Amino acid sequence: MPTLTIDGRTVSVPEGKTILEAAEAAGVRVPHFCWHRALGALGACRLCAVTVLDGPQKGVRMACLTPVQEGMRVSTLDESSWNMRRSVIEWLMANHPHDCPVCDEGGECQLQDMTVAGNHAVRRQRGRKRTFHNQDLGPFIEHEMNRCIACYRCVRTYRDYCGGDDFGVLGSRDRVYFGRFRPGRLLSPFSGNLVDVCPTGTLTDKTSRFRARPWDLEEASSVCPHCALGCAVIPGGRYRELLRVRADPRPQPNDGFLCDRGRFGYGYANRADRPRQARLEGRPGTLAEAVAALRERVEGIARQHGPEAVLLLGSARATVEANALLSLWARRLGAADPVFDLAARRDGAARIFARAAPALRATLADVRQADLTLVCGADPLAEGPLLALALRQAARRGAAVRVIDPRPVPLVCEAERLPLAPTLVPEALRFLAGGNGAGLSQEVLQPLAETKRLFDAARRPVVIGSAEGLGPDGVRALLALVAGASRPDRDAKAALLLPGPSSFACARLASAVPNAQDLRRRLGGGKIRAVVALEVDPLAEAPPAVTGVIEKAELFAALDYLPTATVGRANLFLPSAGPYEQDGAFCDFAGRLRAFARVLRPGTPILHTGKGNHPPRTFSPDVPGGDAAPAWEILAEILGISGGLSGARAEIEKAFSFLQGLAGLRADARDERVLPGGEPPAPPGAPAGPEPAGLRLLLSDPFVGWEPLSAHAAVLEVLRPEDAVYLNPAELARLGLAPGARARVEAQELSEIRVARAADLPPGLAWVVRRRGSALSRLPAGEVFACRVAREEGA
Amino acid sequence: MSREVPRVLFANRRPGLTASLAEFERGGGYRGLRRAVAELSPAEVRRLVADSGLRGRGGAGFPTGVKWSFFPHDAPPDKYLVANCDEMEPGTYKDGELILADPHQLVEGLIVSAYALGANRATVFIRYDYERAACALERALAEAREAGYLGEHILGSDFSLEIHVHRSAGRYILGEETALLNGLEGRRPNPRLRPPFPAQKGLFGRPTNVQNVETLACVPHIVAHGPQWFRGLARTPEGAGTKLFGLSGHLERTECFELPIGTPLREIVEEWGGGVWRGRRFKACLPGGASTPFLDARALDVPMDFTALEKAGSRLGTAGVTVFDDRTCMLRVTHNLISFFARESCGFCTPCREGLPMVRECLARLEAGRGTLDDVDWLKEQVPRINLSFCALAQGAMGPLSSLLALFGDEVLDHVGRGRCPLGEG
């Protein structure tokens, strides 16, 4: 570890680090534009000039490019490097417009900071400033090319880090242009990162354009609620309106990057049709009335008809605290565990994974560092987009990426693909673990054998699956594979994609044994009289057999902040606070409890209550629409637990030993606590029955259009996939369907019309990407169903 | 011509003609290659080149033997040898002349050098405007292939080589070797960060040696006649070989001549260039292309060699000598040169992209007599700062500017004082 001094401060950093990194470690800020922690050094902006007073090459050097040496003496304050930095600012400001008052970056602009820090106040140039035409880059990113200082961070982010290819640098000399070949929407699902990496107002968040100055925003450390990965975010709001989400710049867990779903999917919180008023039998009431009614009626029904008449539905998007308190309520009522996931296959898989040893569970950092990644029965871009980005980082370091899946799973890196019928994926995993590959054909076994060789040689392999793609059988095979491969010199890990930010904790709160059959029995018995839906929309997510029972219940209570079908039908409604409107914790896909802090209080945005986007002139002690409370608070009230969040967490820790440590989590410190493993679930019962003959239907989720929060964000409408049914080209021909023809798809007594499309799928498979609200989408993803696809006549 | 000089690279040069394979062979062509593959190991060829004192002819003058010693000649294939014939330096046209006159000089140079380095692929990266030269080269490659000098098992040996001709899209920055490699790969021709150097990680991530055309052409002659002979060609003890001098500017005769390294500047101007045109006096010259500092009349007796010119405050560069007569406004010359560099900047780093256009505007103001003393001070402070650019393009641009301020500072101030060009008509 070389030791050097920077501005008189002594610091030791590992060999190979640069002066800039050493300075950061010593607490000396070296000005820079093009250097970025995640993107590395480039050497383009020449702002990080420092003076090496003692060292192998004395004089002015670029801090980002100069490796440290033992005994080096560096000054950032020396006149020669100071002068260089002043000149860089002068060069850049010569053409930068003085439009800071109308620039959304103003107040958090690196160029502003550096201009002030560099003491550049007097313009010495005459003549006009250079100008460019801007491009329409779609609904997310605003382009103002005149402000560009050509630091190249955007192209490095978009092309190198995120794998996009429709944005880049064009032209040369002082006319370099950062944009698209033609104006149009940026196609990368990670385009929003341009906003975070751009040090000026060239690329800004269009969804919050002109809505607030950065210093007026209420911001807090939070956790993204749009999937199970638990990316660190810093949302910002003003006037009771959520206005933007940016990535937490710290390296863990998401390396300072976000997907567009997590960044731009916040519109659900501000919807004019968001339910903000408690409702009792169709009559508006206060939240207190509704809470009292909920407790009395559920307890009454349990007393009168027995606890088996109560069905509690937990939620992957509610906080860990709310789900735990719901479990506690079930216990106190003597009722069965809440049902946390209505999709039995996914639920069963999650319960198994949630009990795996913590050392086997991969984090995003593990994926980024992996030297081999297998993606089996998972669609990372849809189910956990940042995982797809982490895969790309592994691939950029040289890791091989192999996909074993029936679908042509989209990724943002090169991958070898092995298309396999869905039911064969678990068998493929068993083969990789040393199984004999029974049931796998020869043309599958050959590439699999090669994959096995790679896997056996890899030192840090990560195998990625998804709960709905693998099912219980597949997850057992997944865990057996990595557990068998882990040795002292070898770190094999597994990642399982789960549907929501609390899924892991829910799966742990539920008993080890899946109770899907149990649920079917309870629903079939005709005993259910009270249904409580905690931030979940069973009417959109469950097949008619389930929804029929729920709708007929005497008490159908819903807590939510989204205008769902369930909220519309419930006869008791309690408005709850959205994820950024409360303190609480989620539990990410690797089983780490992650606390988050409230960004803003719930309430109807002034945009909706005022006239003409101006605060109203009427004053009231109550916040309009501010009745909503965090779901955990509502449930704590029902359970008679006092002491706010800490009181609730203390009770939860007492009731559920595996949630020990929840009470001590602090959001601003990015505390996390790893849930311990558990008793492994019982071995599988009878193996799955034979595959249905004929055409089978497979459903999976899109990037945008299914995940409940972003599906309620209007700005993401453009990203919703086409309502299509994908078939092997030969299959299409057999069915007499031309690509683009309208086809009726029928399965499980549900049917809808979709556009027929050809895709690279195994024969005999029809693939449908779900969309919230469509009939077929009520079938669970991952399972296969016998189906019928026929040309829709008269189309 | 007034003086007998050795003819090595231009031995087969005939006005308006391109030497055929037969002519090249008659003049001793491919003797170096025959000797190399038949008698010498690659290491022995590298030793000969190192002993010859050959220095790169593309501008930087880096000793070729040293550069070759960094090349991992025993690394597995692919290893690349690239001939840099981008030649976009204003005032420089010698490589184009060489290829047009005798393309087999380059072909043999490439083959012998690839043999020495263990490179199995070679590419000639040729300037957009050199279409005639590119065609001549392609014809020569076909002839060489036909004659067994190129392709599989060259002259019956185990050595095989293929040579490709790549026509540049035509930007000055492509002469920078790492930008050239990016251009060859189909990327934006921005210079690359070093390390890794091209010898470690060059074209498509493989070991790559990039050499100037004239440098490569010298190699077979060294192999054929030995390093002592090569050193003896020069007129200075530390120099080695001959050099193609491309003359331009205010001379009676603006042609390309092959002269010994170390030929005095005065001899080049007065004898080979026929003296300054129209009977005028010598004011200044760029001794080695647009990116070398000006020399004034006091430097006329400097021998045109790498070390001597560095002592004189300039560089041999590409040895493209551009002469200015005593009626030339040096501010105007510098403005012209800076305009070229500003236009040819790739736009990668701030000093080059933003600094050069600002210097250009400042020079334009001064030239038009609208400049101030503040402008002159501003120019002076720019030189060391623009010199901190990412690659040598902007540093090269500072050559003429710094020497303008050092040698012709009074002329610059005269523009400010009179409010017009002192040499102008008005």
Image (cartoon, grey):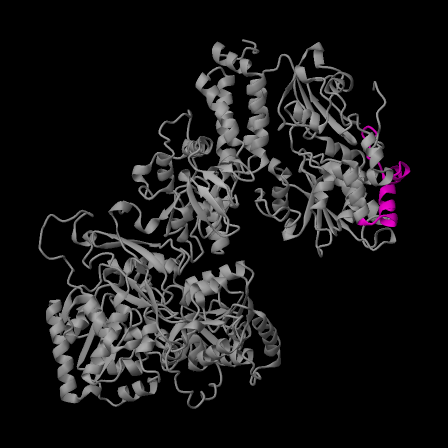
**Image quarter of the C terminus of chain B:** top right
On the image, the x and y values in percent for residue B402 come to: 56, 24
**B420 in the magenta segment:** no
Left or right of B127? Residue B151 is right
Residue B35 belongs to the span the image colors magenta:
yes
Left or right side of A174 for B276: right
Residue A545 visible in the picture: yes
Residue B239 in the image, given as x and y percentages of width and height:
76, 30
Whether residue A722 is visible = no
Residue A457: where, in percent of width, then height? 59, 70
Residue at 41% x, 56% y is A251
* Closest to the observer, A755 or A747: A747
Residue A653 occupies quadrant: bottom left
Measured along the vertical axis of the image, is residue B283 above or below residue B14? above
- In the image, residue A356 sits, relative to residue B43, either above or below, namely below
Using the image, determine if residue A281 lies above or below residue B107.
below
Q: How many marks?
A: 0
Depth order, front residue of A693/A24: A24
The span shown in magenta is B14-42
- Horizontal side, residue B28 vs residue A610: left or right: right
* A532 is higher (above) or lower (below) than A140: below
Q: Position of residue A184 (x, y in %)?
A: 43, 50
Quarter of the figure with the N terminus of chain B? top right
